[in-house]
Amino acid sequence: MKFHRLLAAAAVSTLVFSDLSAQVFNFDDLVVGTQVGAYNGATFTNFQVQTSFGPTSPPNFAFNTEATAMFEFAPGFTSFSFTAGVFTPATVSVYSGLGGTGSLLGSLLVTDPPSAPNAFAANSVAFAGVGQSVVVVSSAGFFGWDDISLTAVPEPATWSLMVGGFGLVGIMARRRRTADA
């Protein structure tokens, strides 16, 4: 019976730690008209908060104030998706290093969806590896995004806790088997 409790605790802790790796940036708690800057563990360069762009991005989103804008997440991420509305095509590129350095891991051309021009649509950049920055290139003020979602690379402490937890479960299972024998 104790083994089942330990196994359940390990499963719950694994779920809790896996949820910590999901990050979402939606700008809803920021003041309209301000530069984004540091936000929820990431850094945004050349993005400003704006109020709703219709029913697809309420209540806030961020738009690019310069032709080149950047998102940086130092711990790294393995997936990157967002909703976006554009007036001219934009290129969204994921790089392995901070500041748009390192290897180009993946790139996406974002255009208006033909079914709903000037509306926010779901987008995802496909890439392999660990990204740390995203560079957006578009005409200034012509690219807006919201609901940015990424899967963060777990911190070493998180991995240590998970491995240690499973190790304890294994030790308890082995003791139980030897006690039952």
Image: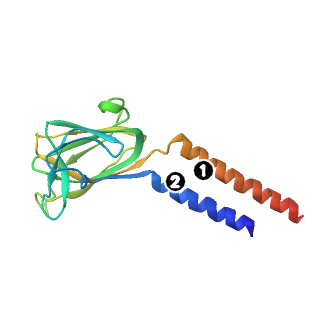
Residue 118 occupies quadrant: bottom left
- Give the CA separation, mark 2 to mark 1: 8 Å
Where is residue 167 drawn, in percent x and y?
A: 69, 50
Question: Where does label 2 land, which residue?
Answer: 17
Where is residue 180 drawn, in percent x and y?
A: 87, 65
Name the secondary structure under disc 2.
Answer: helix
Residue at the extreme top of the image, as rendered: 101
As shown in the figure, which amino acid type bears the numbered disc 1? Met
Quadrant in which the C terminus is drawn: bottom right
Q: Nearer the viewer, residue 51 or 136?
A: 51
Residue 66 occupies quadrant: top left
As shown in the figure, which amino acid type bears the numbered disc 2? Phe
Q: Which residue is located at x 21 percent, y 37 percent?
A: 69
Where is residue 16 drawn, in percent x and y?
A: 51, 58
Is residue 149 left or right of 48 when viewed as pictured? right
Is residue 140 left or right of 14 when viewed as pictured? left
Question: Where does label 1 land, which residue?
Answer: 162
Report crowding for label 1: few under 14, some 14 to 19, many 20 or more residues within 10 A (C-alpha): some
Colour scheme? rainbow
* In the rendered image, the vertical position of residue 62 relative to residue 15, given as above or below: above
Report crowding for label 2: few under 14, some 14 to 19, many 20 or more residues within 10 A (C-alpha): some
Q: Nearer the viewer, residue 138 or 170?
A: 170
**Mark 2 in CB contact with mark 1 (< 8 angstroms):** yes
Is residue 8 left or right of 31 when viewed as pictured? right
Quadrant in which the N terminus is drawn: bottom right
Is residue 72 left or right of 109 when viewed as pictured? right
Where is residue 164 drawn, in percent x and y?
A: 65, 48
- Which circle's residue, 2 or 1, is located before the other in the chain? 2
